[in-house]
Image (cartoon, rainbow, N blue to C red):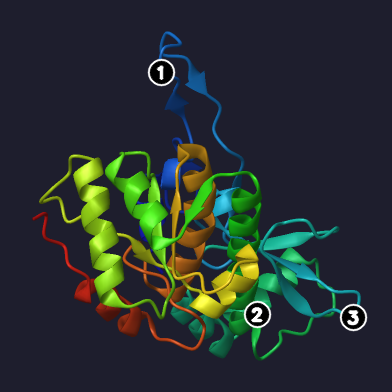
Amino acid sequence: MRNPRNDSLTVKPGGKARGPVTHRGAGLSRVPGDGGAVLPALPERRCILSGRHDARDSLIRLALSPDGDVLPDVLARAPGRGAWIGVNRAELDQAVAKGKLKGALARAFKGAAITIPADLADRIVAGLQRALADRLGIELRSGMIVLGTEKIAAAARAGVVTFLGHASDAGGDGANKLAQAWRVGAQAEGSGRKGVILPLDRAALSVALGRDNVVHLALTDAAAAARVTGLLGRLQFFLGCDSAAAAPSDQTAASVVEQNDAMDTKGD
């Protein structure tokens, strides 16, 4: 199964991936103003289904509960041995149906008795959504998030917005106006730059951020945006949306892509 996130890696048949991991900012990078110093590559893990190697933070860890249930450990904090997957939901469902996942897990967990929940994919989606919501809450408490349409528009026109997001049930008009303000502030008229429809509706965003009726949000710090988009990207990839959009568990990837496409991409 091809994983487009690993296209930058050179893999020999039957061998390990070679070269730096570059997915979503991972891998080797040079530090501006530091004489071209190279940062170390992020830790890699191997997907038990595809055999591909990728940055650890780009994969999803599976762990065993005390009862032998295979459960998602999206933050990779559970103790004991883990297994990593870097496939999307459709590929995971196929691996489950063909028994490939069970065999791969049996090898990864050294023959331990395991049970694969029928709703494993749903649990992965829920876990990634929860991690994203928690991260947004942390960034808000750290002062990195701007809420409120007028405040976001002002920040966007000032050129300080690094990420623009909308609830999955946000109206197109408000999202389009904020996207236009963002393009103007970034001097990117005509670029088609627009915000991202998040995999959370306004009710979920409001709970996550402890505010009433959160429909839009903006990040004003590049590092904070990278932390949010890292989690968002994993969820998007698992849902098969890639970088176009992210959908809540009860929506199809296609429906969210349609929502994003409905947003204005003109620079005027």
Decide if residue 131 is in sight here.
yes
Q: Which residue is mark 3?
A: 67
Do labels 1 and 2 touch, CB within 8 Å?
no
Quadrant of residue 48 in the image?
Answer: bottom right
Q: Which residue is mark 2?
A: 123
Q: Compute the Cα span from label 1 to label 2.
A: 40 Å
Q: Position of residue 246 (x, y in %)?
A: 42, 71
Quarter occupied by the N terminus: bottom left
Q: Position of residue 146 (x, y in %)?
A: 48, 52
Q: Is tag 3's residue or tag 1's residue first in the polypeptide sequence? A: 1
- Residue at 39% x, 73% y: name it: 240
Q: Residues within 10 Å of mark 2 (few under 14, many from 20)?
A: some
Q: Compute the Cα span from label 3 to label 1.
A: 49 Å
Residue type beneath disc 2: Arg
In the rendered image, the residue lying farthest to the right is 66
Q: Residues within 10 Å of mark 3 (few under 14, many from 20)?
A: few
Foreground disc of the pair 1, 2? 1
- Determine which of the numbered discs, if any, sits on residue 32 in the image: 1
189 over 254 or under it: above or below: above
Q: Is tag 1's residue or tag 2's residue first in the polypeptide sequence? A: 1
Residue type beneath disc 1: Pro
Q: Tell me the SS state at disc 1.
A: loop
Quadrant of residue 10 in the image?
Answer: top left
Residue type beneath disc 3: Asp
Q: Is residue 258 left or right of residue 127?
A: left
Do labels 3 and 2 touch, CB within 8 Å?
no
Quadrant of residue 116 in the image?
Answer: bottom right
Q: Is residue 180 left or right of residue 170?
A: left
Q: Is residue 187 left or right of residue 119?
A: left
Q: Is residue 209 left or right of residue 228?
A: right
Q: Is tag 3's residue or tag 2's residue first in the polypeptide sequence? A: 3
Count of all numbered marks drawn on residues in the image: 3
